[in-house]
């Protein structure tokens, strides 16, 4: 470790105590040096130099202090009175009123140590893109520190600012808010010299009473900035006083006044504008509206910084799309590939390594890493930090590419291979024989690691179901927020997690510490166990001939009948097993599976006689919890359940978990939470409650592609049974999805619609087994174009309504041959 060299981000613990104005200080190691800030017990690195902030969220950080201590951390910031500080005598403990506020104070102090420019970006959309593009555009002149990924919140911003150091000379920080009062904190921390407003849309409107309030809140970010770049379309110029303003947009008052936006070919757009009385223009390699607006915003920022348009134009023409997301996909030789081959810096590497560490499905974790773009005098230190990170994040093997990292080979203790360039590695890739591993591919753009990813990835059917793991996490948190303190959470991952995946979803749920997972059949449970899932797993339909496997894989059966109970008890007795966890299902009105009220006495007697099983939980299922028409019935079910379990509780002699609420009941019947709830469809982004939809995010996108385009003459027919007809002359596209992929035949002949480049197009003719045809007469498309089948604008709910079914059926019908790809930011 490099203790002797105190870098810009190292503070003595006593110094920190004074910066955050700790109310009470217990310091046992005065010369503890802090370099790393952490707040999540699951993401710890550099424990000897880490300071842990016990933040209060749904899971109070104070509950994890023992874990943190075990991980080697000895420096804590805790809430005054929340914690018995005398417990650990070999720690430094700083007590404050509010640990988050303390973290923000420390970040603000750290930021003030640097007097280079700081650009702060806010707006409803496009913040991350504008930040990443400015990074691309300004990199030739500046050494830039930017907030990693979308670290733009009350917590992300201080962690981003903490990365500032003398090795940089420009910072670009994203600032996002979701409610009134938040921006002031961000502004105090960031103290931007330049402010940028990307745009204003409807995102996050819920946190504000009016659009006016929202804009006033946003511009608080600019309080201390000298210069602000914005469009008068979103912000009236007179609201900002005492600022140098740089405006852009179509408005005549705009400094950079956009005159014309002209599509050039299929991929480029020519932007014409007037600046300082002269006509200027440039071309960008994008055509969609959002990208164009973000490009114009970047153009304005560069002009505001004093760049010439000719200079700007050269760079804008080569702008690259931003890939901020980690992509998890299936690889060859039973590997999982995490593709992050477009950027490489320490903070995004750490985020990617955390995601790698979450993956439990293969015995090995491998990192393919390129050189990082670094200043010479920071190389040694950074590669040393990376070497330590690899050990902390449980990486088994390093495959490193680049002249620089090669020079530091001796720092790495894990098994490693070094290559001078990507070409060399590609030649050797076969010989390396990578198998049964999770492989993270992390490379700076210049190394073109996408070539490596292509070689390692299984290329299959082109139709793809994209699963957004951030949206899934968002939805999980949205439901957690509805739970009363101490209520446990069971997540339904049956039927391949409602079609969206197996261990990919379970890993994330395990990482987020849900309490139980539930599958329908034993094989689903075994798959999860074989993928390293350690959470308790309930099997709802075990069947008596699977009990051996249940026991072998430590799965927990649902018990719904005497016959089943008896068989299981016998097997356990044969094996001399005691207290095996089981889950008793009661039938309170669904009339599917479960013990009925009349069975209660016998059930109790049977349970009291045996010590082979132990009742872990008792549960029931609501038949119509989402339908207000049946609320009286639902309340009866809840009441019956409550009475049932009360009796069982009195006689069984020990405590168990009670649960009845599914997704719809979580939001509609808070009184039915009991000790645990069972979350299903809501996690996957479908609100089961139409009365007050939660702010769920769509999780899945189904995409396919155009195989062929044909011109159709008047009178010609399309597809089987000659059902397809156009109104006169036209054009059709054949796409690679059919009913065997889960695209229902009922969506044929114009019932279903898909989207090409933002435009809706109807199906024409019958849906075939592996493909179908779209009427694209009015749109400009070419073979190979992407086609959206399900997504934000084409929701599962609408598709379900069109075909007279429910979202559950649509999601679970998406065939296994459709490739699943997972995104994580
Ligand atoms: C599938 C299932 C759930 C989840 O239902 P959602 O409506 O998707 O939330 C809960 N409990 C049982 C017993 C189930 O079978």
Image (cartoon, grey):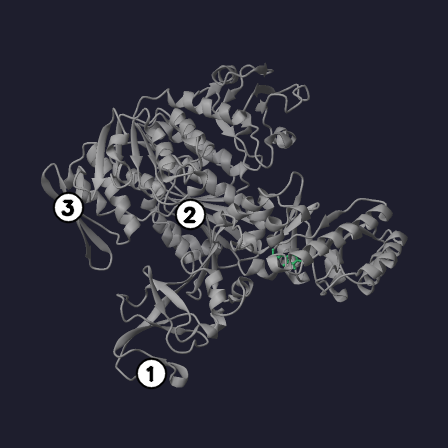
List the single residue furthest toward the left: 278
State the residue in front, 691 or 91: 691
Q: Residue at x 57, y 42 (%)?
A: 481
SS for tag 1?
strand
Between the C-alphas of marks 2 and 3, the distance is 32 Å
Coordinates of residue 47 in the picture (x, y in percent): 55, 29
Coordinates of residue 506 in the picture (x, y in percent): 59, 51
Q: Which residue is mark 1?
A: 717
Disc marking residue 281: 3
Q: Quadrant of residue 707?
A: bottom left
Q: Nearer the viewer, mark 1 or mark 2?
A: 1
Query: Alpha-carbon neighbours of circle 2 within 10 Å: few (<14), some, or many (≥20)?
Result: some
Q: Which residue is mark 2?
A: 325
State the residue in front, 83 or 324: 83
Q: Nearer the viewer, mark 2 or mark 3?
A: 3
Contact? badges 1 and 3 (CB < 8 Å): no
Upstream in the sequence, badge 1 or badge 2? 2
State the residue in front, 56 or 479: 479
Q: Nearer the viewer, mark 1 or mark 3?
A: 1
Query: Alpha-carbon neighbours of circle 1 within 10 Å: few (<14), some, or many (≥20)?
Result: some
Residue 621, compared with residue 59, is above or below; it is: below
Coordinates of residue 809 in the picture (x, y in percent): 55, 65
């Amino acid at each position: 470790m490099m203790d002797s060299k105190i870098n810009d981000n190292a503070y003595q613990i006593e110094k920190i105590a004074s910066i955050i104005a700790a109310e009470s200080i217990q310091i046992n190691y005065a010369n503890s040096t802090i370099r790393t800030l952490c707040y999540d017990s699951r993401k710890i690195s550099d424990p000897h130099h880490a300071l842990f902030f016990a933040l209060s969220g749904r899971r109070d950080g104070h509950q994890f202090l023992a874990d943190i201590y075990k991980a080697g951390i000895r420096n804590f910031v805790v809430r005054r009175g929340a914690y018995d500080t005398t417990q650990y005598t070999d720690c430094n403990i700083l007590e404050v009123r509010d640990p988050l506020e303390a973290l923000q104070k420390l970040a603000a102090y750290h930021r003030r140590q640097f007097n280079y420019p700081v650009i702060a970006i806010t707006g409803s959309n496009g913040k991350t893109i504008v930040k990443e593009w400015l990074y691309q555009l300004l990199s030739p002149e500046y050494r830039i520190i930017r907030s990693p990924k979308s670290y733009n919140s009350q917590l992300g911003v201080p962690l981003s600012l903490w990365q500032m150091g003398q090795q940089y000379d420009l910072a670009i920080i994203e600032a996002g808010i979701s409610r009134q009062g938040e921006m002031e904190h961000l502004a105090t921390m960031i103290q931007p010299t330049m402010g940028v407003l990307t745009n204003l849309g409807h995102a996050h409107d819920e946190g504000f009473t009016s659009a006016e309030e929202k804009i006033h809140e946003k511009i608080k970010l600019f309080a201390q900035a000298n210069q602000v770049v914005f469009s008068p379309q979103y912000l009236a110029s007179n609201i900002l006083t005492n600022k140098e303003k740089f405006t852009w947009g179509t408005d005549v008052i705009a400094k950079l006044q956009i005159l014309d936006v002209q599509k050039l070919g299929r991929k480029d757009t020519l932007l014409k504008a007037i600046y300082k009385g002269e006509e200027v223009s440039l071309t960008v390699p994008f055509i969609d509206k959002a990208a164009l607006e973000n490009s114009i915003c970047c153009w304005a920022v560069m002009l505001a910084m004093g760049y010439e348009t000719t200079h700007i134009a050269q760079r804008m023409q080569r702008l690259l799309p931003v890939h901020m997301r980690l992509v998890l996909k299936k690889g060859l030789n039973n590997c999982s590939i995490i593709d992050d081959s477009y950027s490489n810096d320490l903070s995004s590497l750490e985020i990617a390594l955390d995601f790698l560490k979450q993956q439990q499905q293969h015995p090995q974790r491998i990192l393919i890493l390129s050189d990082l773009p670094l200043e010479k005098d920071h190389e040694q230190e950074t590669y040393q930090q990376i070497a330590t990170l690899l050990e902390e994040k449980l990486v088994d093997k390093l495959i490193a590419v680049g002249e620089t990292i090669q020079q530091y080979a001796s720092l790495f203790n894990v098994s490693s291979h070094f290559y001078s360039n990507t070409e060399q590695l590609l030649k050797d890739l076969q010989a390396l024989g990578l198998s049964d591993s999770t492989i993270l591919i992390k490379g700076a753009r210049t190394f073109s690691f996408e070539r490596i990813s292509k070689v390692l990835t299984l290329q299959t059917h082109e139709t793809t179901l994209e699963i957004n793991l951030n949206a899934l996490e968002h939805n999980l948190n949205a439901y957690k927020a509805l739970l009363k303190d101490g209520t446990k959470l069971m997540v339904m991952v049956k039927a391949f997690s409602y079609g969206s995946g197996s261990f990919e979803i379970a890993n994330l749920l395990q990482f987020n510490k849900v309490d139980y997972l539930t599958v329908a059949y034993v094989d689903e449970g075994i798959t999860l166990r074989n993928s390293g899932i350690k959470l308790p797993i309930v099997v709802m339909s075990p069947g008596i001939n699977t009990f051996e496997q249940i026991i072998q894989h430590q799965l927990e059966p649902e018990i719904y009948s005497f016959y089943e109970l008896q068989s299981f008890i016998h097997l356990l007795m044969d094996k001399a097993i005691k207290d095996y966890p089981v889950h008793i299902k009661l039938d309170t009105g669904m009339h599917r599976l479960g013990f009925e009220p009349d069975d209660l006495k016998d059930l109790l007697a049977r349970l009291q006689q045996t010590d082979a099983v132990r009742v872990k939980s008792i549960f029931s299922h609501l038949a119509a919890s989402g339908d207000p028409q049946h609320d009286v019935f639902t309340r009866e079910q809840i009441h019956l359940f409550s009475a049932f379990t009360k009796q069982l509780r009195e006689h069984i002699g020990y405590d168990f978990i009670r649960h009845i609420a599914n997704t719809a009941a979580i939001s509609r019947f808070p009184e039915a939470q009991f000790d645990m709830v069972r979350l299903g469809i809501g996690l996957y982004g479908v609100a089961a409650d139409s009365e007050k939809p939660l702010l769920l995010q769509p999780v899945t996108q189904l995409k396919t592609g155009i195989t062929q385009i044909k011109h159709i003459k008047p009178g010609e027919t399309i597809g089987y049974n000659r059902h397809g007809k156009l109104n006169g002359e036209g054009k059709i596209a054949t796409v690679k999805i059919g009913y065997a992929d889960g695209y229902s035949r009922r969506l044929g002949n114009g019932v279903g619609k898909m989207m090409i480049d933002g435009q809706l197009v109807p199906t024409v003719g019958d849906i075939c087994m592996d493909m179908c045809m779209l009427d694209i007469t009015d749109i400009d498309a070419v073979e190979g174009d992407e086609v959206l089948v399900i997504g934000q604008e084409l929701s599962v709910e609408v598709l379900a309504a069109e075909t007279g079914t429910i979202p559950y059926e649509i999601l679970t019908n998406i065939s296994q041959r459709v490739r699943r790809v997972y995104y994580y930011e």
